[in-house]
Image (cartoon, rainbow, N blue to C red):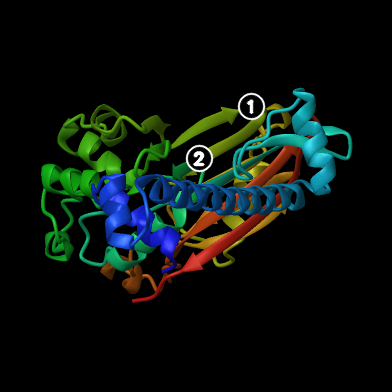
Amino acid sequence: MNNQQKAYELKQNGLSYREVAKEMGLISDEAARSMIRRYNGNKKKTESITTETSRVAVIDAAARALGLSAIELETIAASGRHKVTPPSQFSGLIKGKRHKMMKVGVLTDTHIGHCKFNEELFAKCAEEFRDCDIILHAGDHLEGMSGRGGHVYELSHVGYQAQFNRALELYSLFGKTPIYGIDGNHDQWFKQKNDIGIIVGENLQSALPNYTHLGEWEGDLKIDGLWIKLFHANDGTAYANSYKGQQLVNSLSGGEKPHAIFQGHYHKALYQFTRNVHMFDGGTICGQSQFMRGKKLAAHQGFWTVLFEWDASGVNSVTSKFTAGYE
Protein backbone atom coordinates (compact mmCIF):
# COMPACT_ATOMS: atom_id res chain seq x y z
CA MET A 1 0.00 0.00 0.00
CA ASN A 2 1.52 3.35 -1.02
CA ASN A 3 1.26 6.59 0.97
CA GLN A 4 -1.54 8.03 -1.19
CA GLN A 5 -3.72 4.96 -0.65
CA LYS A 6 -2.94 4.91 3.08
CA ALA A 7 -3.94 8.56 3.42
CA TYR A 8 -7.14 7.92 1.46
CA GLU A 9 -8.13 4.99 3.70
CA LEU A 10 -7.44 6.97 6.87
CA LYS A 11 -9.78 9.70 5.61
CA GLN A 12 -12.40 7.05 4.71
CA ASN A 13 -12.17 5.79 8.30
CA GLY A 14 -13.36 9.18 9.58
CA LEU A 15 -10.14 11.04 10.37
CA SER A 16 -9.91 14.77 9.64
CA TYR A 17 -7.30 16.08 7.22
CA ARG A 18 -5.33 17.39 10.21
CA GLU A 19 -5.42 13.95 11.84
CA VAL A 20 -4.39 12.28 8.58
CA ALA A 21 -1.46 14.67 8.26
CA LYS A 22 -0.37 13.93 11.82
CA GLU A 23 -0.68 10.16 11.29
CA MET A 24 1.30 10.33 8.03
CA GLY A 25 3.95 12.76 9.35
CA LEU A 26 2.97 15.50 6.87
CA ILE A 27 3.65 19.18 7.49
CA SER A 28 0.04 20.37 7.08
CA ASP A 29 -3.55 19.30 6.56
CA GLU A 30 -3.33 20.80 3.03
CA ALA A 31 -0.55 18.29 2.22
CA ALA A 32 -2.87 15.47 3.31
CA ARG A 33 -5.70 16.92 1.20
CA SER A 34 -3.43 17.12 -1.86
CA MET A 35 -2.21 13.53 -1.43
CA ILE A 36 -5.79 12.20 -1.21
CA ARG A 37 -6.83 14.23 -4.28
CA ARG A 38 -4.01 12.65 -6.31
CA TYR A 39 -5.04 9.18 -5.18
CA ASN A 40 -8.68 9.83 -6.21
CA GLY A 41 -7.56 11.01 -9.64
CA ASN A 42 -5.48 7.87 -10.25
CA LYS A 43 -8.33 5.67 -8.95
CA LYS A 44 -10.83 7.19 -11.40
CA LYS A 45 -8.43 6.68 -14.31
CA THR A 46 -8.03 3.00 -13.39
CA GLU A 47 -11.81 2.53 -13.12
CA SER A 48 -12.29 4.27 -16.48
CA ILE A 49 -9.80 1.93 -18.17
CA THR A 50 -11.54 -1.13 -16.62
CA THR A 51 -14.97 0.12 -17.75
CA GLU A 52 -13.73 0.78 -21.28
CA THR A 53 -12.14 -2.68 -21.44
CA SER A 54 -15.46 -4.27 -20.38
CA ARG A 55 -17.39 -2.20 -22.94
CA VAL A 56 -15.07 -3.26 -25.75
CA ALA A 57 -15.40 -6.93 -24.74
CA VAL A 58 -19.23 -6.69 -24.80
CA ILE A 59 -19.23 -5.00 -28.20
CA ASP A 60 -16.85 -7.61 -29.63
CA ALA A 61 -19.04 -10.48 -28.35
CA ALA A 62 -22.25 -8.92 -29.70
CA ALA A 63 -20.61 -8.19 -33.06
CA ARG A 64 -19.43 -11.80 -33.42
CA ALA A 65 -22.95 -13.07 -32.63
CA LEU A 66 -24.38 -10.77 -35.34
CA GLY A 67 -21.72 -11.60 -37.92
CA LEU A 68 -20.49 -7.99 -37.96
CA SER A 69 -17.27 -6.24 -37.10
CA ALA A 70 -17.11 -4.16 -33.92
CA ILE A 71 -16.90 -0.97 -36.03
CA GLU A 72 -20.02 -1.96 -38.03
CA LEU A 73 -21.97 -2.70 -34.86
CA GLU A 74 -20.98 0.61 -33.23
CA THR A 75 -22.00 2.46 -36.42
CA ILE A 76 -25.42 0.77 -36.39
CA ALA A 77 -25.89 1.52 -32.69
CA ALA A 78 -24.84 5.16 -33.12
CA SER A 79 -27.32 5.67 -35.97
CA GLY A 80 -30.23 5.13 -33.59
CA ARG A 81 -32.15 3.09 -36.18
CA HIS A 82 -31.63 -0.30 -34.57
CA LYS A 83 -31.92 -1.46 -30.99
CA VAL A 84 -28.92 -3.41 -29.72
CA THR A 85 -29.76 -5.75 -26.81
CA PRO A 86 -28.12 -8.90 -25.37
CA PRO A 87 -27.52 -11.74 -27.86
CA SER A 88 -30.35 -13.96 -26.57
CA GLN A 89 -32.93 -11.20 -27.15
CA PHE A 90 -31.63 -9.00 -29.92
CA SER A 91 -32.87 -7.79 -33.26
CA GLY A 92 -30.11 -6.77 -35.66
CA LEU A 93 -29.05 -6.79 -39.27
CA ILE A 94 -27.64 -9.85 -41.01
CA LYS A 95 -27.05 -9.80 -44.76
CA GLY A 96 -29.35 -6.82 -45.13
CA LYS A 97 -32.38 -8.48 -43.49
CA ARG A 98 -34.10 -7.79 -40.22
CA HIS A 99 -32.97 -10.69 -38.05
CA LYS A 100 -34.29 -11.98 -34.74
CA MET A 101 -33.09 -14.54 -32.22
CA MET A 102 -34.64 -16.26 -29.23
CA LYS A 103 -33.27 -18.90 -26.89
CA VAL A 104 -35.88 -21.37 -25.67
CA GLY A 105 -35.67 -23.90 -22.85
CA VAL A 106 -37.87 -26.96 -23.42
CA LEU A 107 -38.89 -29.73 -21.05
CA THR A 108 -41.77 -32.16 -20.96
CA ASP A 109 -43.17 -35.13 -19.08
CA THR A 110 -41.83 -34.10 -15.70
CA HIS A 111 -44.34 -36.39 -13.94
CA ILE A 112 -43.89 -34.60 -10.62
CA GLY A 113 -45.09 -36.90 -7.88
CA HIS A 114 -43.68 -40.10 -9.36
CA CYS A 115 -40.89 -41.76 -7.41
CA LYS A 116 -38.75 -41.83 -10.58
CA PHE A 117 -38.94 -38.03 -11.00
CA ASN A 118 -35.30 -36.96 -11.50
CA GLU A 119 -34.68 -34.18 -8.96
CA GLU A 120 -31.02 -33.77 -9.95
CA LEU A 121 -31.87 -33.46 -13.65
CA PHE A 122 -34.58 -30.89 -12.94
CA ALA A 123 -32.15 -28.78 -10.90
CA LYS A 124 -29.69 -28.92 -13.79
CA CYS A 125 -32.49 -27.93 -16.15
CA ALA A 126 -33.35 -24.88 -14.02
CA GLU A 127 -29.69 -23.85 -14.04
CA GLU A 128 -29.37 -24.25 -17.83
CA PHE A 129 -32.57 -22.27 -18.46
CA ARG A 130 -31.35 -19.17 -16.62
CA ASP A 131 -30.26 -17.44 -19.82
CA CYS A 132 -33.30 -18.54 -21.86
CA ASP A 133 -35.84 -16.00 -23.07
CA ILE A 134 -38.79 -18.34 -22.50
CA ILE A 135 -39.45 -21.86 -21.19
CA LEU A 136 -41.83 -24.36 -22.81
CA HIS A 137 -43.46 -27.43 -21.24
CA ALA A 138 -45.17 -29.97 -23.51
CA GLY A 139 -47.40 -31.61 -20.91
CA ASP A 140 -47.62 -34.11 -18.05
CA HIS A 141 -46.51 -31.68 -15.39
CA LEU A 142 -47.83 -34.04 -12.72
CA GLU A 143 -47.85 -37.82 -12.46
CA GLY A 144 -51.55 -37.83 -11.62
CA MET A 145 -53.69 -40.50 -9.99
CA SER A 146 -54.55 -43.19 -12.52
CA GLY A 147 -56.61 -45.47 -10.32
CA ARG A 148 -54.69 -48.37 -11.85
CA GLY A 149 -53.97 -51.12 -9.35
CA GLY A 150 -50.58 -50.67 -7.68
CA HIS A 151 -49.92 -47.24 -9.23
CA VAL A 152 -50.16 -45.51 -5.87
CA TYR A 153 -47.06 -47.39 -4.70
CA GLU A 154 -45.01 -45.68 -7.43
CA LEU A 155 -45.80 -42.21 -6.08
CA SER A 156 -43.62 -39.94 -3.97
CA HIS A 157 -46.50 -37.47 -3.59
CA VAL A 158 -50.03 -38.87 -3.35
CA GLY A 159 -53.02 -36.83 -4.45
CA TYR A 160 -53.54 -33.69 -6.50
CA GLN A 161 -52.69 -31.12 -3.82
CA ALA A 162 -49.40 -32.77 -2.84
CA GLN A 163 -48.25 -33.06 -6.47
CA PHE A 164 -49.42 -29.55 -7.38
CA ASN A 165 -47.69 -27.95 -4.37
CA ARG A 166 -44.45 -29.73 -5.25
CA ALA A 167 -44.73 -28.45 -8.84
CA LEU A 168 -45.04 -24.87 -7.54
CA GLU A 169 -41.89 -25.33 -5.47
CA LEU A 170 -39.94 -26.71 -8.44
CA TYR A 171 -41.19 -24.18 -11.00
CA SER A 172 -40.13 -21.35 -8.68
CA LEU A 173 -36.55 -22.35 -9.58
CA PHE A 174 -37.20 -20.84 -13.03
CA GLY A 175 -37.41 -17.39 -11.48
CA LYS A 176 -39.33 -14.82 -13.51
CA THR A 177 -38.66 -16.36 -16.95
CA PRO A 178 -41.98 -16.70 -18.86
CA ILE A 179 -43.24 -20.30 -18.98
CA TYR A 180 -45.74 -21.53 -21.58
CA GLY A 181 -47.25 -24.99 -21.25
CA ILE A 182 -50.01 -27.43 -22.07
CA ASP A 183 -51.62 -30.28 -20.14
CA GLY A 184 -50.92 -33.91 -21.04
CA ASN A 185 -52.86 -37.09 -20.43
CA HIS A 186 -51.53 -37.58 -16.87
CA ASP A 187 -52.53 -34.02 -15.95
CA GLN A 188 -55.99 -34.66 -17.35
CA TRP A 189 -56.57 -37.65 -15.09
CA PHE A 190 -57.41 -34.99 -12.48
CA LYS A 191 -60.05 -33.64 -14.86
CA GLN A 192 -61.45 -36.82 -16.36
CA LYS A 193 -61.27 -39.42 -13.58
CA ASN A 194 -64.67 -39.34 -11.90
CA ASP A 195 -65.27 -36.05 -13.77
CA ILE A 196 -63.43 -34.09 -11.07
CA GLY A 197 -62.77 -31.23 -13.50
CA ILE A 198 -59.36 -30.03 -12.27
CA ILE A 199 -57.36 -28.35 -15.05
CA VAL A 200 -53.73 -28.38 -13.93
CA GLY A 201 -52.50 -25.72 -16.37
CA GLU A 202 -55.18 -23.22 -15.40
CA ASN A 203 -54.28 -23.67 -11.74
CA LEU A 204 -50.58 -23.21 -12.52
CA GLN A 205 -51.47 -20.00 -14.37
CA SER A 206 -53.43 -18.73 -11.35
CA ALA A 207 -50.63 -19.57 -8.92
CA LEU A 208 -47.57 -18.51 -10.94
CA PRO A 209 -47.40 -14.98 -12.43
CA ASN A 210 -44.96 -16.11 -15.15
CA TYR A 211 -46.93 -19.20 -16.31
CA THR A 212 -49.31 -19.15 -19.30
CA HIS A 213 -51.62 -22.09 -20.00
CA LEU A 214 -51.90 -22.67 -23.76
CA GLY A 215 -54.41 -25.52 -23.67
CA GLU A 216 -55.00 -29.23 -23.20
CA TRP A 217 -53.30 -31.68 -25.60
CA GLU A 218 -51.92 -28.85 -27.75
CA GLY A 219 -51.35 -25.13 -27.87
CA ASP A 220 -49.81 -22.53 -30.17
CA LEU A 221 -47.40 -19.73 -29.33
CA LYS A 222 -46.66 -16.93 -31.80
CA ILE A 223 -43.93 -14.45 -30.92
CA ASP A 224 -42.92 -11.70 -33.33
CA GLY A 225 -43.36 -13.88 -36.43
CA LEU A 226 -42.12 -17.17 -34.90
CA TRP A 227 -44.79 -19.89 -34.60
CA ILE A 228 -44.24 -22.75 -32.14
CA LYS A 229 -46.70 -25.55 -31.41
CA LEU A 230 -46.73 -27.65 -28.24
CA PHE A 231 -48.34 -31.08 -28.66
CA HIS A 232 -48.99 -33.94 -26.27
CA ALA A 233 -49.97 -37.21 -27.93
CA ASN A 234 -52.32 -39.79 -26.45
CA ASP A 235 -51.46 -43.01 -28.21
CA GLY A 236 -48.84 -45.73 -27.97
CA THR A 237 -45.23 -45.43 -29.06
CA ALA A 238 -43.95 -46.66 -32.43
CA TYR A 239 -41.15 -49.08 -33.29
CA ALA A 240 -39.20 -46.25 -34.97
CA ASN A 241 -38.71 -43.21 -32.75
CA SER A 242 -39.05 -40.84 -35.70
CA TYR A 243 -42.40 -42.18 -36.93
CA LYS A 244 -44.79 -40.39 -34.54
CA GLY A 245 -43.25 -37.00 -35.25
CA GLN A 246 -43.41 -37.56 -38.99
CA GLN A 247 -47.02 -38.70 -38.67
CA LEU A 248 -47.92 -35.56 -36.70
CA VAL A 249 -46.35 -33.19 -39.23
CA ASN A 250 -47.93 -35.09 -42.14
CA SER A 251 -51.36 -34.74 -40.50
CA LEU A 252 -51.18 -30.93 -40.68
CA SER A 253 -52.41 -29.07 -43.73
CA GLY A 254 -50.23 -26.35 -45.23
CA GLY A 255 -51.86 -23.48 -43.35
CA GLU A 256 -51.62 -25.33 -40.03
CA LYS A 257 -47.88 -25.92 -40.13
CA PRO A 258 -45.88 -24.01 -37.51
CA HIS A 259 -42.16 -23.32 -37.72
CA ALA A 260 -41.46 -25.77 -34.89
CA ILE A 261 -43.25 -28.43 -32.85
CA PHE A 262 -42.28 -29.73 -29.44
CA GLN A 263 -43.98 -33.03 -28.67
CA GLY A 264 -44.46 -34.74 -25.33
CA HIS A 265 -45.87 -38.11 -24.19
CA TYR A 266 -43.51 -40.68 -25.69
CA HIS A 267 -40.53 -39.89 -23.41
CA LYS A 268 -38.28 -39.89 -26.48
CA ALA A 269 -35.69 -37.29 -27.50
CA LEU A 270 -35.33 -36.62 -31.22
CA TYR A 271 -34.98 -33.80 -33.74
CA GLN A 272 -36.01 -34.05 -37.38
CA PHE A 273 -36.75 -31.56 -40.14
CA THR A 274 -39.73 -32.63 -42.20
CA ARG A 275 -42.08 -30.64 -44.48
CA ASN A 276 -40.18 -27.50 -43.44
CA VAL A 277 -41.12 -28.05 -39.80
CA HIS A 278 -38.52 -28.35 -37.04
CA MET A 279 -39.92 -31.35 -35.17
CA PHE A 280 -38.70 -32.13 -31.64
CA ASP A 281 -39.60 -34.97 -29.31
CA GLY A 282 -38.97 -33.47 -25.90
CA GLY A 283 -37.69 -36.36 -23.75
CA THR A 284 -38.66 -36.58 -20.07
CA ILE A 285 -37.52 -35.59 -16.59
CA CYS A 286 -38.71 -38.92 -15.18
CA GLY A 287 -37.09 -42.34 -15.17
CA GLN A 288 -38.60 -45.50 -16.59
CA SER A 289 -41.88 -46.29 -14.83
CA GLN A 290 -43.08 -49.81 -14.13
CA PHE A 291 -45.62 -49.42 -16.94
CA MET A 292 -42.86 -48.50 -19.43
CA ARG A 293 -40.63 -51.27 -18.11
CA GLY A 294 -43.36 -53.81 -18.74
CA LYS A 295 -43.86 -52.48 -22.28
CA LYS A 296 -40.06 -52.49 -22.87
CA LEU A 297 -40.08 -48.74 -23.56
CA ALA A 298 -36.98 -46.62 -22.91
CA ALA A 299 -37.19 -43.24 -21.18
CA HIS A 300 -34.93 -40.64 -22.81
CA GLN A 301 -34.26 -38.42 -19.82
CA GLY A 302 -33.17 -34.87 -20.56
CA PHE A 303 -34.20 -31.43 -21.81
CA TRP A 304 -33.57 -29.12 -24.77
CA THR A 305 -32.16 -25.64 -25.23
CA VAL A 306 -32.92 -24.29 -28.70
CA LEU A 307 -31.76 -21.08 -30.36
CA PHE A 308 -34.10 -19.87 -33.11
CA GLU A 309 -32.98 -17.32 -35.71
CA TRP A 310 -35.56 -15.90 -38.10
CA ASP A 311 -36.55 -12.96 -40.25
CA ALA A 312 -39.49 -12.00 -42.46
CA SER A 313 -38.80 -14.94 -44.79
CA GLY A 314 -39.08 -17.51 -41.97
CA VAL A 315 -36.80 -19.49 -39.68
CA ASN A 316 -33.33 -19.67 -41.21
CA SER A 317 -31.39 -21.34 -38.39
CA VAL A 318 -32.11 -23.65 -35.46
CA THR A 319 -29.31 -24.60 -33.07
CA SER A 320 -30.32 -27.21 -30.49
CA LYS A 321 -28.71 -29.01 -27.57
CA PHE A 322 -30.15 -31.97 -25.70
CA THR A 323 -28.81 -32.36 -22.17
CA ALA A 324 -29.23 -35.97 -21.11
CA GLY A 325 -29.75 -37.32 -17.61
CA TYR A 326 -29.37 -40.81 -16.20
CA GLU A 327 -30.57 -42.70 -13.15
Name the residue at 19% across, 43% down. Answer: 164
The three-letter amino acid code for the residue at tag 2 is Leu
Q: Residues within 10 Å of mark 2 (few under 14, many from 20)?
A: many
Residue 326, image x and y in percent? 39, 75
User: Are the residues flagged by discs 2 and 1 in contact, CB closer than 8 Å?
Assistant: no
Point out residue 140 in the picture as x, y percentages from the top left corner. 34, 48
Give the crowd class for mark 1: few <14, some 14-19, many >=20 residues within 10 Å.
few
Task: Please report the residue visible at 36 percent of the width from the left and 56 percent of the height from the top.
Answer: 7
Say which residue appears at 12% left-offset and 42% top-offset. Answer: 161
Q: Which residue is mark 2?
A: 230
Q: Note whether residue 53 is visible.
A: yes
* SS of the residue under disc 1: loop
Residue under pointer 1: 224
Q: In this rendering, does residue 264 appear at all? A: no
Q: With 223 as the anchor, is 21 left or right in this view?
A: left
Q: Amino acid at mark 1?
A: Asp
Residue situated in front as seen by the camera: 239 or 101: 101
Residue 43 falls left or right of residue 287: right
Where is the N terminus found, in terms of image quarters? bottom left
